[in-house]
Amino acid sequence: MTKHMETIKFLRLLKVRGSKKLLHLLYFPLWLLFKLRNLGFTHAEKDTEEDPRVSKERSIRKLLERIPGGKFLEVGIGEFPHFERLKLINEHSISYVGCDFKSVCESHEEELAIKGFDTKNISFAMNSTGTYSWTLFEMLQKGEQFDVIYVDGHHTFYIDLPAMMLADKLLKPGGYLLLDDIPWSLSFLKANMMRSLSQWYFYRTMYNFSDYTKEQQSLPHIKMIAEELLIKRSGYKKDENLSLPHWWVLRK
C-alpha cells in the first residue's frame, strides 16, 4: 500500500472521528443539564488491578490461541473496534460476530473499511430497536453455536439476564463465557457520564436510571447473575488462571 493511500485513509478516519466530536460539542448544553439534574451525586470506585485493560487483552489472547478455526461472539462491541484483537482473530482463522445496536455496528464497519481491514471472517448482528436479546434468540433458532462468547453489553439486570441465558444456550459444551466489568454498577456509569461529555453522548439514550432504585443502581448486576445463576445453578466453573477482579472467564 502506497504512502499516499495510507494518508487518504488516515484523513478519512480523522474526518469520521472529527464529525463525532463535533456532534458531542453540539450536545454540550444537554450534558450540562444532565449534570445539574444529578447535582450532589458522588461515586468512587478504585481499580483492583494495575492495568485491567492490558490484563484483559492478555487473557483474551490466550483464549483465542485455544480455538483456531473456531467461532467467537461478542455481545456489546463498544464505541470503537479493537483492531489488534480482530487482527489476532483473523490470524487464527476465527469467525467473529459482533452484536450491538445498528448504529454502533455500522460505525465499526465504517472504521474497518477506512482502515482497509480484512473482514472476510468478521460480521455483525444488529438490532435497530429493543435489545440484542432478540438477535441472540434468532441465532438460537438458526442453531448457531460458538466456542467463545464475550458479554460486554448493557450490564444491567433486565437486559443482560435474558441475554446471558441465551448466551448459555448458544455456547458449546466446554466453551468459554467471558464477562467484563464484574464490579460495574449504574452508579459507576452515572459518575463517568457526569465526568465525560463523550461518555454521556455515547450512553445517553441507552440507559434509564429510573428503572432501578438507588440501592439497585449501586449493585453489580453482572456479578450477581453470574454467581447466582451460572456458577451456583448451571455448573459453570471460573477459570482462575484467566480471570481477573474486573473480568471473569467461565467454562461451561
Image (spheres, rainbow, N blue to C red):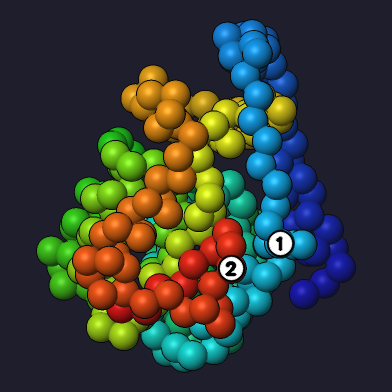
Q: Residue furthest left?
A: 141
The answer to which of marks 1 and 2 sits earlier in the sequence is: 1
What residue lies at 29% left-to-right and 39% top-to-bottom?
158
Left/right of residue 127 with respect to residue 24 in the rendered view: left
Q: Distance between the residues labelled 1 and 2?
A: 8 Å
Tell me which amino acid carries mark 2. Answer: Leu
Tag on residue 244? Answer: 2
Q: Does residue 35 appear to the left or right of 216 in the view shown?
A: right
Q: Is mark 1 on a helix, strand or loop?
A: loop
The foreground one among 99 and 193 is 193
Residue drawn at point x = 54 percent, y = 64 percent: 247
Q: Quadrant of the N terminus?
A: bottom right
Viewer can see residue 125:
no
Mark 1: few/some/many CA within 10 Å (<14, 14-19, 20+): few
Q: Is residue 119 visible?
A: yes
Q: Mark 1 points at which residue?
A: 49
